[in-house]
Protein backbone atom coordinates (compact mmCIF):
# COMPACT_ATOMS: atom_id res chain seq x y z
CA UNK A 1 0.00 0.00 0.00
CA UNK A 2 2.82 2.42 0.81
CA UNK A 3 4.46 1.73 -2.54
CA UNK A 4 1.21 2.50 -4.36
CA UNK A 5 0.44 5.64 -2.37
CA UNK A 6 3.97 6.98 -2.79
CA UNK A 7 3.67 6.46 -6.53
CA UNK A 8 0.35 8.34 -6.49
CA UNK A 9 1.85 11.18 -4.46
CA UNK A 10 4.36 11.70 -7.27
CA UNK A 11 1.42 12.45 -9.56
CA UNK A 12 -0.44 14.77 -7.19
CA UNK A 13 0.62 18.13 -8.60
CA UNK A 14 -0.27 17.14 -12.15
CA UNK A 15 -3.68 15.67 -11.29
CA UNK A 16 -4.74 18.42 -8.88
CA UNK A 17 -3.24 21.09 -11.14
CA UNK A 18 -5.13 19.87 -14.21
CA UNK A 19 -8.34 19.67 -12.17
CA UNK A 20 -7.89 23.27 -11.00
CA UNK A 21 -7.18 24.45 -14.56
CA UNK A 22 -10.29 22.63 -15.79
CA UNK A 23 -12.35 24.29 -13.06
CA UNK A 24 -11.26 27.68 -14.38
CA UNK A 25 -13.04 26.83 -17.62
CA UNK A 26 -16.00 24.97 -16.06
CA UNK A 27 -17.13 26.21 -12.65
CA UNK A 28 -19.19 23.05 -12.20
CA UNK A 29 -15.91 21.11 -11.77
CA UNK A 30 -14.92 22.98 -8.60
CA UNK A 31 -16.46 20.34 -6.25
CA UNK A 32 -14.52 17.67 -8.17
CA UNK A 33 -11.28 19.50 -7.36
CA UNK A 34 -12.07 19.28 -3.65
CA UNK A 35 -12.81 15.56 -3.84
CA UNK A 36 -9.52 14.91 -5.66
CA UNK A 37 -7.61 17.02 -3.13
CA UNK A 38 -9.14 15.15 -0.18
CA UNK A 39 -8.16 11.84 -1.75
CA UNK A 40 -4.55 12.99 -1.96
CA UNK A 41 -4.54 14.09 1.67
CA UNK A 42 -5.41 10.47 2.50
CA UNK A 43 -2.78 9.21 0.05
CA UNK A 44 -0.10 11.31 1.77
CA UNK A 45 -1.17 10.07 5.17
CA UNK A 46 -0.73 6.45 4.13
CA UNK A 47 2.47 7.09 2.18
CA UNK A 48 4.38 9.26 4.65
CA UNK A 49 2.46 9.07 7.93
CA UNK A 50 1.15 12.65 7.70
CA UNK A 51 -1.60 14.27 5.64
CA UNK A 52 0.53 17.32 4.88
CA UNK A 53 3.80 19.07 5.58
CA UNK A 54 3.35 21.75 8.20
CA UNK A 55 3.78 25.37 7.11
CA UNK A 56 3.67 28.75 8.80
CA UNK A 57 0.39 29.41 6.99
CA UNK A 58 -1.56 26.51 8.49
CA UNK A 59 -3.35 28.49 11.21
CA UNK A 60 -4.28 31.46 8.97
CA UNK A 61 -5.54 29.01 6.35
CA UNK A 62 -7.63 27.22 8.99
CA UNK A 63 -9.20 30.54 10.02
CA UNK A 64 -9.84 31.39 6.38
CA UNK A 65 -11.46 27.98 5.92
CA UNK A 66 -13.71 28.53 8.95
CA UNK A 67 -14.73 31.97 7.66
CA UNK A 68 -15.56 30.37 4.31
CA UNK A 69 -17.93 28.06 6.19
CA UNK A 70 -19.42 31.08 7.99
CA UNK A 71 -20.01 32.91 4.73
CA UNK A 72 -22.08 30.00 3.40
CA UNK A 73 -24.26 30.34 6.51
CA UNK A 74 -24.78 34.12 6.44
CA UNK A 75 -25.20 34.63 2.70
CA UNK A 76 -28.58 35.52 1.31
CA UNK A 77 -27.60 34.13 -2.08
CA UNK A 78 -26.04 30.66 -1.69
CA UNK A 79 -26.09 30.11 -5.43
CA UNK A 80 -23.70 33.06 -5.80
CA UNK A 81 -21.58 32.37 -2.73
CA UNK A 82 -20.97 28.63 -3.01
CA UNK A 83 -18.99 28.69 -6.29
CA UNK A 84 -16.70 31.34 -4.80
CA UNK A 85 -16.22 29.32 -1.63
CA UNK A 86 -15.38 26.30 -3.77
CA UNK A 87 -12.88 28.39 -5.72
CA UNK A 88 -11.22 29.53 -2.50
CA UNK A 89 -10.98 25.92 -1.32
CA UNK A 90 -9.60 24.92 -4.72
CA UNK A 91 -6.87 27.51 -4.25
CA UNK A 92 -6.03 26.09 -0.83
CA UNK A 93 -5.98 22.61 -2.37
CA UNK A 94 -3.45 23.54 -5.04
CA UNK A 95 -1.38 25.34 -2.40
CA UNK A 96 -0.94 22.17 -0.34
CA UNK A 97 -0.45 20.09 -3.47
CA UNK A 98 2.49 22.31 -4.46
CA UNK A 99 4.07 22.31 -1.00
CA UNK A 100 3.81 18.55 -0.52
CA UNK A 101 4.78 17.52 -4.03
CA UNK A 102 7.92 19.65 -4.08
CA UNK A 103 9.01 18.41 -0.66
CA UNK A 104 8.57 14.70 -1.26
CA UNK A 105 11.65 13.04 0.31
CA UNK A 106 14.13 12.33 -2.52
CA UNK A 107 14.95 8.82 -3.64
CA UNK A 108 17.80 7.47 -5.70
CA UNK A 109 15.54 7.20 -8.75
CA UNK A 110 13.22 10.20 -8.38
CA UNK A 111 13.59 13.95 -8.70
CA UNK A 112 15.13 15.91 -5.88
CA UNK A 113 13.06 18.71 -4.25
CA UNK A 114 15.17 21.44 -5.89
CA UNK A 115 14.58 19.89 -9.30
CA UNK A 116 10.85 19.68 -8.62
CA UNK A 117 10.76 23.32 -7.59
CA UNK A 118 12.54 24.51 -10.72
CA UNK A 119 10.38 22.36 -12.96
CA UNK A 120 7.20 23.65 -11.32
CA UNK A 121 8.34 27.26 -11.74
CA UNK A 122 8.99 26.65 -15.42
CA UNK A 123 5.48 25.21 -15.85
CA UNK A 124 3.84 28.08 -13.96
CA UNK A 125 5.60 30.62 -16.19
CA UNK A 126 4.50 28.56 -19.20
CA UNK A 127 0.92 28.84 -17.92
CA UNK A 128 1.39 32.61 -17.99
CA UNK A 129 2.43 32.39 -21.63
CA UNK A 130 -0.63 30.24 -22.38
CA UNK A 131 -2.89 32.83 -20.76
CA UNK A 132 -1.14 35.50 -22.82
CA UNK A 133 -1.89 33.69 -26.08
CA UNK A 134 -5.52 33.30 -24.98
CA UNK A 135 -5.62 37.05 -24.40
CA UNK A 136 -4.45 37.74 -27.94
CA UNK A 137 -7.60 36.05 -29.27
CA UNK A 138 -10.06 37.42 -26.76
CA UNK A 139 -9.02 40.89 -25.61
CA UNK A 140 -10.60 43.86 -27.28
CA UNK A 141 -9.82 47.56 -27.14
CA UNK A 142 -11.86 49.17 -24.38
CA UNK A 143 -13.18 52.64 -23.83
CA UNK A 144 -12.00 54.68 -20.83
CA UNK A 145 -8.52 53.26 -21.21
CA UNK A 146 -5.14 54.95 -21.42
CA UNK A 147 -4.99 54.99 -25.23
CA UNK A 148 -1.30 54.22 -25.16
CA UNK A 149 -1.86 51.83 -28.05
CA UNK A 150 -3.68 52.82 -31.25
CA UNK A 151 -6.92 51.03 -32.12
CA UNK A 152 -5.27 49.86 -35.34
CA UNK A 153 -3.00 47.56 -33.33
CA UNK A 154 -6.00 45.78 -31.79
CA UNK A 155 -7.61 45.41 -35.21
CA UNK A 156 -4.57 43.42 -36.34
CA UNK A 157 -5.08 40.84 -33.59
CA UNK A 158 -6.90 37.64 -34.58
CA UNK A 159 -10.47 37.40 -33.32
CA UNK A 160 -12.00 34.35 -31.71
CA UNK A 161 -14.82 33.92 -29.28
CA UNK A 162 -16.74 36.83 -27.78
CA UNK A 163 -13.93 38.75 -26.12
CA UNK A 164 -15.42 38.14 -22.69
CA UNK A 165 -12.11 38.03 -20.81
CA UNK A 166 -11.94 41.26 -18.87
CA UNK A 167 -8.60 43.00 -19.48
CA UNK A 168 -8.17 43.84 -15.79
CA UNK A 169 -8.69 40.19 -14.82
CA UNK A 170 -6.15 39.00 -17.34
CA UNK A 171 -3.67 41.70 -16.34
CA UNK A 172 -4.04 40.98 -12.63
CA UNK A 173 -3.27 37.31 -13.16
CA UNK A 174 -0.32 37.95 -15.46
CA UNK A 175 1.09 40.45 -12.96
CA UNK A 176 1.49 37.55 -10.55
CA UNK A 177 3.39 35.35 -13.00
CA UNK A 178 5.47 37.91 -14.87
CA UNK A 179 7.97 38.57 -12.03
CA UNK A 180 8.93 34.88 -11.92
CA UNK A 181 9.99 35.10 -15.56
CA UNK A 182 11.51 38.57 -15.29
CA UNK A 183 13.64 37.75 -12.25
CA UNK A 184 14.80 34.54 -13.91
CA UNK A 185 16.05 36.56 -16.85
CA UNK A 186 17.58 39.27 -14.65
CA UNK A 187 19.42 37.09 -12.14
CA UNK A 188 20.25 33.67 -13.63
CA UNK A 189 23.82 33.30 -14.82
CA UNK A 190 24.06 33.16 -18.60
CA UNK A 191 27.16 30.97 -18.77
CA UNK A 192 25.93 28.32 -16.32
CA UNK A 193 22.26 28.18 -17.35
CA UNK A 194 21.94 29.57 -20.90
CA UNK A 195 18.69 27.80 -21.81
CA UNK A 196 16.96 29.06 -18.66
CA UNK A 197 18.14 32.59 -19.40
CA UNK A 198 16.68 32.41 -22.90
CA UNK A 199 13.44 30.78 -21.70
CA UNK A 200 12.76 33.33 -19.01
CA UNK A 201 13.72 36.20 -21.28
CA UNK A 202 11.29 35.14 -24.00
CA UNK A 203 8.44 34.41 -21.59
CA UNK A 204 8.98 37.71 -19.75
CA UNK A 205 8.79 39.56 -23.07
CA UNK A 206 5.59 37.80 -24.17
CA UNK A 207 3.76 38.21 -20.87
CA UNK A 208 4.91 41.81 -20.49
CA UNK A 209 3.61 42.74 -23.94
CA UNK A 210 0.17 41.31 -23.16
CA UNK A 211 0.00 43.18 -19.85
CA UNK A 212 0.65 46.41 -21.74
CA UNK A 213 -2.02 45.50 -24.32
CA UNK A 214 -4.62 45.21 -21.55
CA UNK A 215 -3.99 48.88 -20.66
CA UNK A 216 -5.03 48.09 -17.10
CA UNK A 217 -4.03 50.98 -14.85
CA UNK A 218 -3.54 48.73 -11.84
CA UNK A 219 -1.38 46.33 -13.86
CA UNK A 220 0.75 49.09 -15.37
CA UNK A 221 1.24 50.60 -11.91
CA UNK A 222 2.28 47.13 -10.72
CA UNK A 223 4.77 46.89 -13.61
CA UNK A 224 6.37 50.12 -12.41
CA UNK A 225 6.61 48.80 -8.85
CA UNK A 226 8.03 45.49 -10.11
CA UNK A 227 10.77 47.28 -12.06
CA UNK A 228 11.69 49.45 -9.08
CA UNK A 229 11.75 46.39 -6.81
CA UNK A 230 13.88 44.50 -9.33
CA UNK A 231 16.39 47.35 -9.46
CA UNK A 232 16.60 47.41 -5.66
CA UNK A 233 17.14 43.65 -5.47
CA UNK A 234 19.47 43.36 -8.44
CA UNK A 235 21.99 46.14 -7.77
CA UNK A 236 23.62 47.23 -4.53
CA UNK A 237 22.70 50.88 -4.94
CA UNK A 238 19.37 50.19 -6.58
CA UNK A 239 17.57 51.75 -3.62
CA UNK A 240 18.65 55.14 -4.98
CA UNK A 241 15.91 54.69 -7.60
CA UNK A 242 13.41 55.29 -4.79
CA UNK A 243 14.83 58.80 -4.37
CA UNK A 244 14.46 59.45 -8.09
CA UNK A 245 10.84 58.29 -7.98
CA UNK A 246 10.12 60.42 -4.92
CA UNK A 247 11.48 63.52 -6.68
CA UNK A 248 9.57 62.65 -9.87
CA UNK A 249 6.37 62.11 -7.90
CA UNK A 250 6.71 65.45 -6.15
CA UNK A 251 7.30 67.15 -9.51
CA UNK A 252 4.23 65.46 -11.03
CA UNK A 253 2.03 66.54 -8.10
CA UNK A 254 3.30 70.10 -8.45
CA UNK A 255 2.70 70.08 -12.21
CA UNK A 256 -0.71 68.37 -12.46
CA UNK A 257 -2.05 68.30 -8.92
CA UNK A 258 -2.91 65.36 -6.70
CA UNK A 259 -6.57 65.27 -7.78
CA UNK A 260 -5.73 64.94 -11.48
CA UNK A 261 -3.25 62.16 -10.76
CA UNK A 262 -5.77 60.30 -8.59
CA UNK A 263 -8.43 60.63 -11.31
CA UNK A 264 -5.98 59.28 -13.88
CA UNK A 265 -5.10 56.25 -11.74
CA UNK A 266 -8.67 55.59 -10.61
CA UNK A 267 -10.55 55.81 -13.88
CA UNK A 268 -11.47 52.59 -15.64
CA UNK A 269 -14.08 50.75 -17.62
CA UNK A 270 -16.58 50.62 -14.76
CA UNK A 271 -15.45 53.56 -12.60
CA UNK A 272 -15.18 57.15 -13.77
CA UNK A 273 -12.31 58.55 -11.76
CA UNK A 274 -11.56 58.92 -8.07
CA UNK A 275 -15.08 60.07 -7.23
CA UNK A 276 -16.58 56.79 -8.44
CA UNK A 277 -13.90 54.76 -6.71
CA UNK A 278 -14.38 56.59 -3.41
CA UNK A 279 -18.11 55.96 -3.69
CA UNK A 280 -17.71 52.21 -4.04
CA UNK A 281 -15.02 52.10 -1.33
CA UNK A 282 -17.28 54.01 1.04
CA UNK A 283 -20.08 51.50 0.54
CA UNK A 284 -17.60 48.71 1.17
CA UNK A 285 -16.50 50.32 4.44
CA UNK A 286 -20.13 50.62 5.51
CA UNK A 287 -20.59 46.89 4.90
CA UNK A 288 -17.51 46.00 6.94
CA UNK A 289 -18.71 48.28 9.75
CA UNK A 290 -22.15 46.64 9.78
CA UNK A 291 -20.92 43.03 9.32
CA UNK A 292 -17.40 43.01 10.83
CA UNK A 293 -17.33 39.43 12.11
CA UNK A 294 -19.06 37.48 9.35
CA UNK A 295 -18.97 39.58 6.21
CA UNK A 296 -21.95 39.75 3.88
CA UNK A 297 -21.36 36.49 1.98
CA UNK A 298 -18.84 35.99 -0.80
CA UNK A 299 -19.86 37.50 -4.11
CA UNK A 300 -22.97 39.35 -2.88
CA UNK A 301 -21.54 42.89 -2.90
CA UNK A 302 -23.56 43.94 -5.94
CA UNK A 303 -26.86 42.72 -4.47
CA UNK A 304 -26.25 43.96 -0.93
CA UNK A 305 -25.03 47.35 -2.14
CA UNK A 306 -28.11 47.78 -4.31
CA UNK A 307 -30.47 46.83 -1.49
CA UNK A 308 -28.85 48.50 1.54
CA UNK A 309 -26.19 50.92 0.32
CA UNK A 310 -27.36 52.56 -2.93
CA UNK A 311 -24.96 54.88 -4.68
CA UNK A 312 -25.69 58.58 -4.65
CA UNK A 313 -23.69 59.36 -7.79
CA UNK A 314 -24.31 56.53 -10.26
CA UNK A 315 -26.86 53.91 -11.19
CA UNK A 316 -24.22 51.66 -12.79
CA UNK A 317 -23.92 48.13 -11.39
CA UNK A 318 -20.58 47.57 -9.61
CA UNK A 319 -19.85 43.87 -8.88
CA UNK A 320 -17.09 44.38 -6.29
CA UNK A 321 -15.26 47.00 -4.23
CA UNK A 322 -12.31 47.50 -6.61
CA UNK A 323 -9.91 46.97 -3.71
CA UNK A 324 -8.60 43.52 -2.88
CA UNK A 325 -8.23 44.02 0.86
CA UNK A 326 -11.59 45.72 1.29
CA UNK A 327 -13.27 43.03 -0.82
CA UNK A 328 -11.93 40.23 1.39
CA UNK A 329 -13.17 42.06 4.51
CA UNK A 330 -16.58 42.59 2.88
CA UNK A 331 -16.83 38.92 1.90
CA UNK A 332 -15.38 37.20 4.98
CA UNK A 333 -15.32 39.88 7.66
CA UNK A 334 -12.32 41.26 9.52
CA UNK A 335 -11.22 37.78 10.76
CA UNK A 336 -11.04 36.60 7.14
CA UNK A 337 -8.98 39.64 6.13
CA UNK A 338 -6.58 39.16 9.06
CA UNK A 339 -6.12 35.49 8.14
CA UNK A 340 -5.50 36.36 4.48
CA UNK A 341 -2.96 39.03 5.48
CA UNK A 342 -1.26 36.44 7.69
CA UNK A 343 -0.81 34.17 4.67
CA UNK A 344 0.50 37.09 2.61
CA UNK A 345 3.00 37.99 5.34
CA UNK A 346 4.17 34.38 5.56
CA UNK A 347 4.65 34.37 1.79
CA UNK A 348 6.78 37.51 1.99
CA UNK A 349 8.91 36.10 4.80
CA UNK A 350 9.40 32.82 2.95
CA UNK A 351 10.40 34.60 -0.28
CA UNK A 352 12.77 36.87 1.64
CA UNK A 353 14.44 33.87 3.27
CA UNK A 354 14.91 32.18 -0.10
CA UNK A 355 16.43 35.38 -1.54
CA UNK A 356 18.76 35.68 1.46
CA UNK A 357 19.89 32.06 1.10
CA UNK A 358 20.65 32.70 -2.56
CA UNK A 359 22.74 35.76 -1.73
CA UNK A 360 24.65 33.96 1.03
CA UNK A 361 25.50 31.05 -1.28
CA UNK A 362 26.03 33.15 -4.40
CA UNK A 363 23.61 30.97 -6.40
CA UNK A 364 21.75 32.93 -9.03
CA UNK A 365 18.93 30.42 -9.47
CA UNK A 366 17.96 30.69 -5.81
CA UNK A 367 18.29 34.48 -5.89
CA UNK A 368 16.01 34.58 -8.95
CA UNK A 369 13.45 32.37 -7.19
CA UNK A 370 13.36 34.52 -4.06
CA UNK A 371 13.31 37.81 -5.96
CA UNK A 372 10.56 36.61 -8.29
CA UNK A 373 8.36 35.52 -5.38
CA UNK A 374 8.92 38.81 -3.56
CA UNK A 375 8.05 40.86 -6.65
CA UNK A 376 5.04 38.69 -7.46
CA UNK A 377 3.49 39.38 -4.08
CA UNK A 378 4.42 43.05 -4.34
CA UNK A 379 2.52 43.13 -7.65
CA UNK A 380 -0.45 41.45 -5.95
CA UNK A 381 -0.56 44.22 -3.35
CA UNK A 382 -0.09 47.04 -5.85
CA UNK A 383 -2.76 45.83 -8.25
CA UNK A 384 -4.99 44.99 -5.29
CA UNK A 385 -5.10 48.64 -4.23
CA UNK A 386 -7.11 49.47 -7.36
CA UNK A 387 -8.89 46.20 -8.14
CA UNK A 388 -9.96 42.83 -6.71
CA UNK A 389 -9.40 40.61 -9.73
CA UNK A 390 -7.39 37.96 -7.87
CA UNK A 391 -10.17 37.02 -5.47
CA UNK A 392 -13.59 35.43 -5.35
CA UNK A 393 -15.54 35.55 -8.54
CA UNK A 394 -12.47 35.54 -10.79
CA UNK A 395 -11.73 32.16 -12.36
CA UNK A 396 -7.89 32.43 -12.26
CA UNK A 397 -7.94 33.30 -8.51
CA UNK A 398 -6.15 30.00 -7.56
CA UNK A 399 -2.96 31.32 -9.21
CA UNK A 400 -2.37 33.42 -6.09
CA UNK A 401 -2.30 30.21 -4.07
CA UNK A 402 0.11 28.62 -6.54
CA UNK A 403 2.56 31.48 -5.99
CA UNK A 404 2.20 31.14 -2.22
CA UNK A 405 2.66 27.39 -2.52
CA UNK A 406 5.91 27.87 -4.43
CA UNK A 407 7.12 30.30 -1.75
CA UNK A 408 6.36 27.87 1.09
CA UNK A 409 7.86 24.96 -0.85
CA UNK A 410 10.98 26.94 -1.70
CA UNK A 411 11.72 27.93 1.88
CA UNK A 412 11.35 24.27 2.81
CA UNK A 413 13.73 23.18 0.08
CA UNK A 414 16.41 25.75 0.88
CA UNK A 415 16.23 25.45 4.65
CA UNK A 416 19.52 23.61 5.25
CA UNK A 417 18.74 22.64 8.83
CA UNK A 418 15.41 20.99 8.04
CA UNK A 419 15.40 20.36 4.29
CA UNK A 420 11.94 18.77 4.17
CA UNK A 421 10.10 20.72 6.84
CA UNK A 422 8.86 24.28 6.84
Image (tube, rainbow, N blue to C red):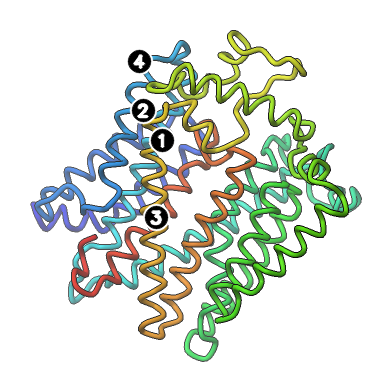
- Residue beneath disc 1: 88
How far, Cα to Cα, is label 1 from label 3?
A: 17 Å
Tell me the mark number nearer the camera, choosing from 1 and 4: 4
Q: Determine the secondary structure under disc 3.
A: helix
According to the picture, the residue beneath numbered tag 4 turns out to be 73
**Precedes in sequence: disc 1 or disc 3:** 1
Contact check, label 3 and label 4, Cβ < 8 Å: no
Q: Nearer the viewer, mark 3 or mark 4?
A: 3
Question: Of tags 1 and 3, which is closer to the observer?
Answer: 3
Viewer-proximal residue, 297 or 352?
352
Q: Which residue ends up furthest to the top in the rendered image?
A: 307
* Front label number (2 vs 1): 2
Give the residue at mark 2: 68
At label 3, counting other C-alpha atoms closer than 10 Å, the crowd grade (few under 14, some 14-19, many 20 or more) is many
Q: Quadrant of the C terminus?
A: bottom left
First of labels 2, 1 by sequence position: 2
Disc number lying in front (3 or 2) = 3
Amino acid sequence: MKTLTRFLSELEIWIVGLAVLASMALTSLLPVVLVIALVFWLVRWIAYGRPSIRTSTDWPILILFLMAMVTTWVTALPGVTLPQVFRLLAGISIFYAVVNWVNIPPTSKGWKPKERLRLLTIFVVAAGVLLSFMAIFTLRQQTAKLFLIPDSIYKLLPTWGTGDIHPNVMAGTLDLLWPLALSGFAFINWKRHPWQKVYYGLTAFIIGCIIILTQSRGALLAIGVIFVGLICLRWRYGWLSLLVIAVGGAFAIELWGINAIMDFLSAGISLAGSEGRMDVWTRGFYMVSDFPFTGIGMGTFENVAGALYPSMITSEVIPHTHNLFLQIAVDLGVPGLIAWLGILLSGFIAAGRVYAVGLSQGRTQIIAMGAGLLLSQLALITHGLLDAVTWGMVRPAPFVWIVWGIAMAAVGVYNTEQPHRI
